[in-house]
């Protein structure tokens, strides 16, 4: 999926011109196993508050490096929002046992400059579809009680929210898979693979 969005950052003085932030040729696609370092770099770029919102507590750079190194071992499915070959937002679908079962967990992260642009909601849609296609019947999403943005996204996707020990637990019941949901993911994967190849070529040229 290729996105092209243009947003305007609000200026506190209405008499002055507003600054425009343009995101061109952005791609929302699934990460491949060889791209775990891109996921790591994204998480390391998160500011202190965004990092705490992602993991529900403060984490060190060493923790993030260890976490992303185990991404493939955990069998997580990660979707990234790519801008110029770099991940600026990500969503992770993680199984809660050795195999995909009826329950799974989702987590999201968006770098500060890319927040409030609808990217988190787009990622949520991808995660729900991926969970649906794997037979997941209950998708959990945990966030801090103060994380109003993520709660709003969860409500938009009809999540049932409940408070538990200072956190908000979102529960989403995906529909079962059908021909169209499976086909849509397969098509996205094919396009995503081609975009991954192009991203890799661009990084090799840049590093040369």
Image (cartoon, grey):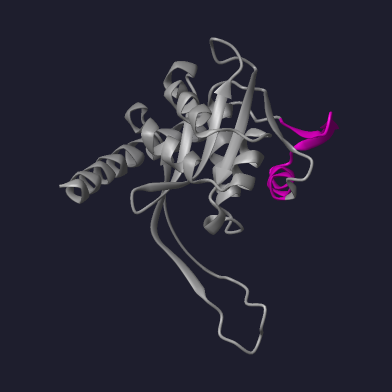
Is residue 155 in the magenta section?
yes
Is residue 166 in the magenta section?
yes
Q: Is residue 149 above or below residue 183?
A: below
Percent of width and height locating residue 5: 48, 63
Percent of width and height locating residue 135: 58, 20
Percent of width and height locating residue 171: 74, 31
Residue drawn 42% across and 40% down? 41
Q: Is residue 69 above or below residue 113?
A: above
Q: Is residue 19 visible?
A: yes
Residue drawn 55% across and 15% down? 100
Residue drawn 75% across and 49% down? 148
Q: Nearer the viewer, residue 121 or 68?
A: 68
Percent of width and height locating residue 206: 21, 50
Residue 40 shown left or right of residue 161 in the figure: left
Q: Is residue 178 visible?
A: no
What is the magenta range?
Answer: 149-172
């Amino acid at each position: 999926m290729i996105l092209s969005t243009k947003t305007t950052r609000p200026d506190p003085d209405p008499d002055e011109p507003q600054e425009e932030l343009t995101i061109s040729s952005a791609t929302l696609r699934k990460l491949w196993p060889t791209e775990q370092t891109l996921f790591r770099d994204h998480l390391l770029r998160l500011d202190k508050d965004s990092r705490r919102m992602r993991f529900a507590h403060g984490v060190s750079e060493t923790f993030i490096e260890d976490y992303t190194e185990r991404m493939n071992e955990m069998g997580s499915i990660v979707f990234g929002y790519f801008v110029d070959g770099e991940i600026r937002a990500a969503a992770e679908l993680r199984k809660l046992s050795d195999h995909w079962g009826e329950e799974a967990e989702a987590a999201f992260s968006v770098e500060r400059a890319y927040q409030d642009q609808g990217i988190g909601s787009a990622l949520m849609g991808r995660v729900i579809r991926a969970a649906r296609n794997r037979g997941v019947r209950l998708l959990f999403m945990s966030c801090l009680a103060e994380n109003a943005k993520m709660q709003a996204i969860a409500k938009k996707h009809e999540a049932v929210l409940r408070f538990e020990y200072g956190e908000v637990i979102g529960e989403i019941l995906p529909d079962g898979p059908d021909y169209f949901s499976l086909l849509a993911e397969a098509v996205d994967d094919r396009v995503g693979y081609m975009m991954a190849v192009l991203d890799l070529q661009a990084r090799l040229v840049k590093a040369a």
